[in-house]
Amino acid sequence: MLLTLNPVITGGRATWPELAKVAHEAGFPGVEIPIVAAMKDSAATIKQTLAANGVKPGAIGLPTEIRKDEATFEKDLAGLAQAASYAAAIGCPRMATWIPSSSSLPKPEQRKLMMGRIRKVCDILERSHVRLGLEFLGPLHIRTANPHEFIWKMGEMLEFARECGSNCGLLLDSWHWHHAGATAEDIVKAGRKAIVHVHLADAQDLPPEKVKDNERLLPGEGIVNWKGFFGALKEIGYKDAVSPEVFGRGLKDMPLGEATRITREATSKLMKSLNVA
């Protein structure tokens, strides 16, 4: 599995192409690609930057906003074909986004809206052989933020993704996997083709009503069932990127080098202990 630096860890203090250098200096063998910033350069330049820093591309955030109004969605969608072609050209045919687990619309209406948009996205990505991962959000405070609960369980999100397109699967986040009550068996049942990308963060031992999405721990510091999580990924043969996405934990208040270093060290230590590094 390829351990990649997520821009979240930098707290916005590193942009592209500096992000590749920061990843290298912290010991990450991979880096997430902020495609909007990266596309200011040619694909050949991006590949040169990656090679010069000894890092490989992990995944790309979907540059199309699917959660706002229709005008915003259609405007973003117009540039997606170019972004998809670019992603393929730099050797990173994986994009990911998240789906809100509550909505102002009743669930059937929200499902129809999201599926219509995501199918359009998947059709465009497919032309460049790019896959899309959808993230399910598990914590109670997100599921109850709006009047109507939407998809938040792993199995239901995977079913939804498969209806959206043959190139659509899951962005599997250990934090949300834990808070959604998902299991290692769910990962094994999903299978390798279903997992497009993986995010890592640990959880405090708190009752559901006390959990906040911006208060996470470094992998190995909390109560997530890492043996089950990584064991299942290993069992299905997942070999793509795993990216620590840790909000909070005081990382933004640390010097940039320290924040990235301790994140890499904690994650590497955990993965080595589980024989998945």
Image: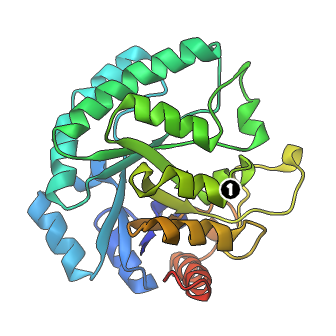
Q: Where, by quadrant of the figure, is residue 144 drawn?
A: top right
Image quarter hosting the N terminus: bottom left
Taking depth in this image into account, of 171 and 183 the one nearest to the observer is 183
Does the image show residue 105? yes
Q: Secondary structure at mark 1?
A: loop
> Residue 100: image x %, image y %?
59, 33
Determine whether, in the image, residue 18 is placed left or right of residue 150.
Answer: left
- Image position of 72 with respect to 39: above or below: above
Q: Where, by quadrant of the figure, is residue 222 drawn?
A: bottom right
Taking depth in this image into account, of 54 and 41 the one nearest to the observer is 54
Q: Which residue bears the numbered disc 1?
A: 183
Q: Residue at x 57, y 66 (%)?
A: 232
Does the image show residue 218? no
> Residue 183: image x %, image y %?
68, 56
Q: Residue at x 47, y 47 (%)?
A: 170
- Image position of 46 with respect to 213: above or below: below
Q: Residue at x 36, y 16 (%)?
A: 71
Determine whether, in the image, residue 235 is placed left or right of residue 86.
Answer: right
- Image position of 70 with respect to 10: above or below: above
> Residue 173: image x %, image y %?
57, 55
- Image position of 68 with respect to 161: above or below: above
Question: For the residue marked with disc 1, what is the amino acid?
Answer: Thr
Q: Residue at x 55, y 17 (%)?
A: 110
